[in-house]
Image: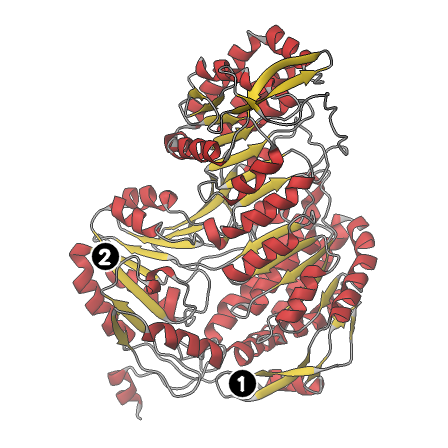
Amino acid sequence: MSVAEIFESMDWGPAPESRAEADAWLDGQGRRFGHFIGGKRLDAGETFATVNPATGEVLAEVTQGSEADVAAAVKAARKAQGAWAAASGHDRARVLYAIARGLQKHSRLFAVLEVLDSGKPIREARDIDVALAARHFYHHAGHAELGDEELPGARPWGVCGQIVPWNFPLLMLAWKVAPALAMGNAVVLKPAEWTPLTALAFADICQQAGVPPGVVNIVTGDGATGAALVRAEIDKLAFTGSTEVGRILRRETAGRGIGLTLELGGKSPFVVFEDADLDGAIEGLVDAIWFNGGQVCCAGSRLLVQEGIAEDFQRRLIARMAKIRVGDPLDKAVDMGAMVHAEQKARVEAMLARTSGTVHRGEAPEGCYLPPVLVSDLQSADPLMQEEVFGPVLAMTTFRTPAEAVMLANDTSYGLAASVWSQDIDVALDCAPRIDAGIVWVNGTNMMDAAAPFGGMKESGFGREGGIAGLRAYLRPETGPKLSAPKRYEGEAAPSDPVDRTAKMYVGGKQARPDGGYSRPVYGPKGAVGEVGIANRKDLRNAVEAARGAAGWSASTGHLRAQILYYLAENLAAREAEFDARLKAQGAKDAATDAVRALFRWAAWADKHDGRTLGVPMGGLALALNRPVGVIGAFAAEDAPLTAMANMIGGALATGNRLVLIAPETAPLSATDLYQVLDTSDVPAGVVNVLTGDHAELAPQMAGHLGVDAVWSFSSAEISGVIEREAAADLKRTWVNYGRGRDWSAAEPFLSAGTEVQTVWVPFGL
């Protein structure tokens, strides 16, 4: 073809990236890989093949990790971690900086290895994955240097197990390893079975950068290897993968007292309003769902288009889809590469075969390739609108109003990411924070950075990676001294007496008798001092319904919340002597003045827990907003019962949450006395609900209730594992203790547990 003909047709010719450097590296390793443990690359054991999905070529043989291999890696990490944590932040920063430089120096090697192993196009691996991986180590080198100033007194978890997926093997490695090392942890990383090569190449970078032996360990293998890592003696687990596996991990780690971060699946809405730049939105869709083959958890796979432009938008989209180039992922002129594995391709095809929508398909070569696909004429309940596909499949429906757009966007169990397109910034910024997603892009998509928190809401997981929130995930939570069991006075057992009319609970702003009609006497050092009701499942259900009905509280201003908390503190202060007498009668070691002080502190915090503007390398803003978790179920502490309840009420309400509080079993009358204070302090009905009863009986019901968004427990250590295990059903957030006390003066743990960080990206400029 002549130059003149090329200018006439504007066809793209092939522009293949050389794979010579990657082949030389593979050949230099004998194309057989053992684990990287204790700073050494071990001999290969029993192996499996890793295959180039674009061609079917076997790239290398990789060792299948056993339980003994995992144990050896954890032992090496444990041996190295103490000295690494004791090193100065400056020394750790130098090592992380050297890793970043190493990734940049060998960027071509890593980009091509990533393409050969995963099938993703070279443009994505080169321009996004490797560059952003290096950015993570640069950014966290800064956190290591400034750690004592940013987070004084912070303590690392210790040995962190990390499991990364096949869609972003190198980037997810960097996302996890960089903050862990910056804060003084050692890691045992298991890469995905299908894509282990860049993790194995990263071992070379660690050696060259001076990472002490044992601080980074890499064990390859399949799901059995991952399961062995979960069972191992680790202190924290960070996992990125499917929601179903996330549920399993929540159950398997329950009761162990280890840290857990889950970044799980998504079904991200891509919302296009009628005033949007339609061509810009279409190019955003190409980036969001087709450029990466849809093999990304935050892909904008649910297209919601305003009804008035839907026909025109669909016509333009189908025309653009026909121009997407699918082929050799090493070709720089290709938009979409291969699916990662034939199994994944077959899964996506099976989902398409079951849909009732209208399927529009682009073109793709034979082999492990799929074309770009648009499925229109769907309803929100259609499986393709609800289930994660992990392929280049875009499911489309329409909406009429902004309110309906938000409703449809939230009509899923997932909450990972979203994209909103409108030229009216008021419309865009009104909708964006109301979408239940951990990250929302305005007039853009797939923008990420080490400084910006990333993670999900609802069943897309919990915890954050990136930013200060992600850094805290690699630090042990603040706790107090080990608790001793509170004294229980004779006669407290057996809730068998018919309920006294005074033995009421507090639900929806009203006092209510327990559904079961039973109460128990409360004893102190001098005998019976009162009677409380025994809550059952129905009482809990009523309290949760009341809390969900008080959603307006979560939308209220911090100023309003502060006023009400000040008023609550003032009214409690007026009755200090009465509360002190009741505490003494129950044998509780506490003082009402401490509870009053706590409520004043939370009133002060209510309008001061600000979000952040993040320093990201882009033209525009990235905003980290603090969103309330929602409905919190909480089990009160037995030590300092009134002060503990004041902190739980104050911490939950200051951050905009609604509360279902289970009173302390040894001093429940201090909770029932609070009813009148709540009634006279303008706390809206349903915002605080108080039940009395047996913690062990109510814990599984609270943790398993689908209307509860998070569970806090400062009760006995025994129910902590129960709460974590039952919370796995819908992956609700948990904050529990394991026999440790709480520093009630520390605000940060309450602020973190009471909020979800939502990152909103707003690009602007020319």
Instruction: Give the vertical position of 703 relative to 562 (above or below).
Output: below
- Residue at 75 percent across and 32 percent down: it is 483
- Residue at 68 percent across and 82 percent down: it is 47
Instruction: Give the vertical position of 395 relative to 612 (above or below).
Output: below
Instruction: Tell me the quarter of the image containing the C terminus.
Output: bottom left
Whole-percent x, y for residue 520 in the image: 60, 22
In this image, 372 relative to 452: left or right?
Answer: left
Find disc 1 in the rendering and name its residue.
Answer: 18
Q: How is the image coloured?
A: secondary structure
Which circle's residue, 1 or 2, is located before the other in the chain? 1
Q: CA distance from mark 1 to mark 2?
A: 44 Å
Residue type highlighted by circle 2: Thr
Q: Which image quadrant for residue 286?
A: bottom left
Q: Residues within 10 Å of mark 2 (few under 14, many from 20)?
A: many
- Label 2 sits on a secondary structure element that is strand
Whole-percent x, y for residue 414 in the image: 43, 54
Q: Mark 1 against mark 2, which lies toward the viewer?
A: 2
Whole-percent x, y for residue 138 in the image: 62, 57
Find disc 2 in the rendering and name its residue.
Answer: 398
